[in-house]
Amino acid sequence: MDFFSSFAPTMSLYITSLASGSNGNCYYIGNEHEAVLIDAGISCRETERRMSRLTLSMRKIRAIFISHEHTDHTRGSEVISRKYNIPVYITAATHRNSRLWIDPQLVKPFYTDDPVNIGGLSIHAFAKRHDASEPHSFTVTGNGTTVGVLTDIGTACEHVVRHLSQCHAAFLEANYDEKMLEEGRYPLFLKRRIRGDDGHLSNHQALELFTTHKPPFMSLLVLSHLSAQNNSPQLVYDLFSRHANGTRIVVASRYEETEVFSVE
């Protein structure tokens, strides 16, 4: 039975993290009729398996949007696109640096701050700081509801702040705990990359962004892209829960999908 058959028509968006971490990132956002994937960083087979467990249909996916060229965001896109005839929205620079081979008829460009409309969904790409050729984050709006995918962010720039403040729900990076990174086994150059302006958000940087700029109507925050070595799901959950102020806090797993959340 399809997930949506158990619901009467609503004004919701339905979202899940299918994977979140350096081993793969893939976020599903949709309404009752169509959906998009933001990044496709796990294999087609694993994407199908996780979607099936959630009783979500691959046939509802109308597009894949690629945030940047790193393989943990692109790994499954070629096969998924080919098997299901799904267009891949990607900037020219990201495509050039990704080494992806996608049917040219299925390659679609997107442009900063120029929304793409797919059925009842509007996908808005905006620039961010990260060590990639042309990195973007996204908001997806439908049924009067906006969901943000805000990961792989070195600095909470004005674009990130502005878009987070519009979100009813968001996937927000909380990549590392500062103390764990400092005392951990990573080489110095990698520590500097992670905490640099084009790296990743720490737990406390993400918390400051959340507490300072979240709108009063944000009902759900899914903490995403946690480091396996330099963070702890329980640590980051406890940290954000103390400051949630009515927003539900969930930590996305790097090993399995979350439940499907209905966001109104």
Image (cartoon, rainbow, N blue to C red):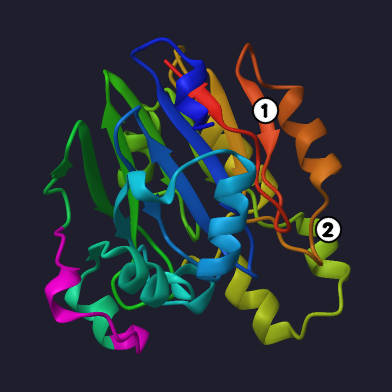
Alpha carbons under labels 1 and 2: distance apart? 22 Å
Please name the residue shown 33% across and 36% down the image: 163
Amino acid on which disc 1 is placed: Ile
Is residue 214 among the parts visible in the rendering?
no
Give the answer, above or below, for where 78 lies relative to 145. below
Amino acid on which disc 2 is placed: Lys
Q: Quadrant of residue 130?
A: bottom left
Q: Quadrant of residue 182?
A: bottom right
The answer to whether 120 appears left or right of 40 in the picture is: left
Pointer 1 residue: 249
The answer to whether 243 appears left or right of 92 in the picture is: right
Q: Quadrant of residue 211?
A: top right
Among the two numbered marks 1 and 2 on one chain, the one whose residue lies closer to the N terminus: 2
Instruction: Indicate the position of residue 88 as horizontal and vertical percent values.
Output: 26, 65
Between 41 and 97, the one nearer to me in the picture? 41
Of circles 1 and 2, which is in front? 1
Q: Residue furthest front?
A: 1
- Work out which quarter of the rendered image holds the N terminus and state it: top right
Tell me the SS state at disc 1: strand
Magenta span = 97-111
Instruction: Indicate the position of residue 245 as horizontal and vertical percent values.
Output: 64, 13
